[in-house]
Amino acid sequence: MGYIFYETFKYCPHVLKEPTLCLIIPLTLLFLVRSVKNISPVKNIIFASLSFVWLIHADERCFIYFPFFVLLFLLVRPFKTNQFLKSTGTWICCVLLLMLLWGIRNYKAFNQIVILTSLTTAITPRAWGKNLVETASNFSNEYTKQKLINRRRGIAIQFGNQYEITPREYGYLDARARALIYFWQPAYFKPTFI
């Protein structure tokens, strides 16, 4: 007889997100494909919304899949515009409704509209609110910033000497491009600096 270890669901989404993502992404796709094939479409759209909201709360980067999941409703055969709009509208409304409670919690916690986590406020401060990541960072004064940069430079030089590579500072755009690649790259096969 097998047992379910409930503590896994408590800690795994925060520490090791990969098993959670490997469960929820196919689960969301399964429910969406079942709704497209007209197997209890409303029920499957609701389950797909639940699993998608669980997915974006496990890892907010997965919100980027939202438009791709919406495009799945284009696969309905025979294609009817009103059916597409109805299914898409139901999907979007369910996702927004399920995110509403978390949005209210974030508004009470941060005193501003925060989508998912405070990390997303790095994108939204031009539209509303302030960047909560900057206000909570160690870069509040110039002395602390310089001390942290010098410490990181020393670690980088030690690492570079060990693997015979030379650390260097990147320009604004080059640093952003490398950070984006680093963020989405699954593995490195040789030592590198970011």
Image (cartoon, rainbow, N blue to C red):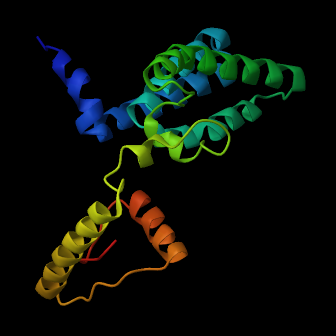
Q: Position of residue 72 (x, y in %)?
A: 68, 34
Placement of the N terminus among the 4 image quadrants: top left
191 with respect to 44 (left or right) = left
Q: Position of residue 169 (x, y in %)?
A: 38, 81
At x 61% / y 36%, what residue is drawn? 66
At x 66% / y 10%, what residue is drawn? 42
Which residue is situated farthest in the right direction here? 81
- Residue 45: image quadrant is top right
Placement of the C terminus among the 4 image quadrants: bottom left
- Residue 14: image quadrant is top left
At x 61% / y 14%, what residue is drawn? 97
Q: Is residue 121 visible?
A: yes
Front residue (pair 70, 44): 70
Image mark count? 0
162 with respect to 43 (left or right) = left
Q: Position of residue 115 (x, y in %)?
A: 54, 31
Residue 44 position (above or below residue 140): above
Q: Is residue 37 visible?
A: no
At x 58% / y 13%, what residue is drawn? 46
Q: Position of residue 5 (x, y in %)?
A: 15, 18
- Residue 19: image quadrant is top left
